Every structure is written in C-alpha cells, then in structure tokens.
Amino acid sequence: MVGTQTEAVGLYIGLNLILTLVLAILVVRQRAKHEISLGTGGNDDLERAMRAHGNNVEYVAIALPGLIALALLGASTTLIHIAGLLVTVGRVGHAIGISNGISLFRQIGTLSTWFGILALGVGCLWIVFG
C-alpha cells in the first residue's frame, strides 16, 4: 500500500486520469467506426461510450479535490485509500456496466462511487469539526 497521504492521493489521481483518457479514446473509436463527428447520430454504442466518459468526468471532478482536501487536512492514509478505492472501483464498474449494458455493474459502480464521495465529505467535515 502507498505510504503517505500525498502518495495515496497521487495513486488515485493517476488511476482516474488514465481511466478518463481510456474512456475518451473509446468515444473517439466509436465516432471513427460509425463516422459520426458530432452528437450521437442515434447510435447506441456511441451514446453508451459518451455517457460512460461524461459520467466519469462528472464524478471524478468531485472526488479528486475531496481526496486532496483529506490529505491537506491530515487524514489517515487508510481513509484516503478507502475513499479512493470506492470511487475508483466504482467508476470502473460503472463504465463497464454502461458500456456493455450490464445494469448490475452500473448500479454497483454508482453506489460505490456515492459511498466513496460520502466518505470524502464526512471525512473532511469530521476533521474540521471533530
């Protein structure tokens, strides 16, 4: 396990940046495959790829600053890993589920992400007011 708070945050930032890039590449591949340069053209595969990428960006943009805040506030590395893992695994699960039409992966991914973000928020408030 990564040792310091800063290293733990760096781990989850790195993983989520790479995931976001992979999802963006999948959108571009669908656009090229179906020769659609703007919008979805009514193509379900492109729509799923775009939503997987867009949804990932929406949640990661909330979670990563939360991880940074925990580290700056001096949270335990364990808390950072728990929240970071929940968000990261949740984002991967959601992306697999939405891309392949597997509702269970999508739902579990969403719940994992929400619990991770809840841990980030509660962790920050606990340190500030606790």
Image (cartoon, helix red, strand yellow):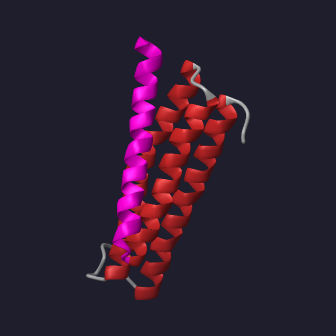
Residue at the left extreme of this rendering: 42
Q: Is residue 110 above or below residue 115?
A: below
Q: Is residue 118 above or below residue 20?
A: above
Q: Quadrant of residue 61?
A: top left
Residue in the foreground of this view, choosing between 82 and 62: 82
Q: Is residue 108 left or right of residue 76?
A: left
Image quarter in which the C terminus is found? top left
Q: Is residue 37 visible?
A: no
Residue in the foreground of this view, choosing between 30 and 64: 64
Residue at image location 46% in from the left, 56% down from the top: 91
Q: Residue 51 placed where, x, y %?
A: 35, 65
Residue at image location 49% in from the left, 47% down from the top: 86
Q: Is residue 118 magenta?
A: yes
Q: Is residue 99 left or right of residue 64?
A: left
Q: Is residue 33 magenta?
A: no
Residue at the top extreme of this rendering: 129
Image quarter in which the N terminus is found? top right
Residue at image location 26% in from the left, 82% down from the top: 42
Q: Is residue 109 above or below residue 2?
A: below
Residue at image location 40% in from the left, 87% down from the top: 34
- What segment is highlighted magenta in the picture? 101-130
Q: Residue 94 placed where, x, y %?
A: 42, 62
Q: What secondary structure characterizes most of the magenta part? A: helix
Residue in the foreground of this view, choosing between 28 and 99: 99
Q: Is residue 17 visible?
A: yes
Q: How many dots with numbers?
A: 0
Q: Residue 126 placed where, x, y %?
A: 43, 20
Q: Is residue 29 left or right of residue 41?
A: right
Q: Is residue 10 left or right of residue 34?
A: right
Q: Residue 115 placed where, x, y %?
A: 40, 43
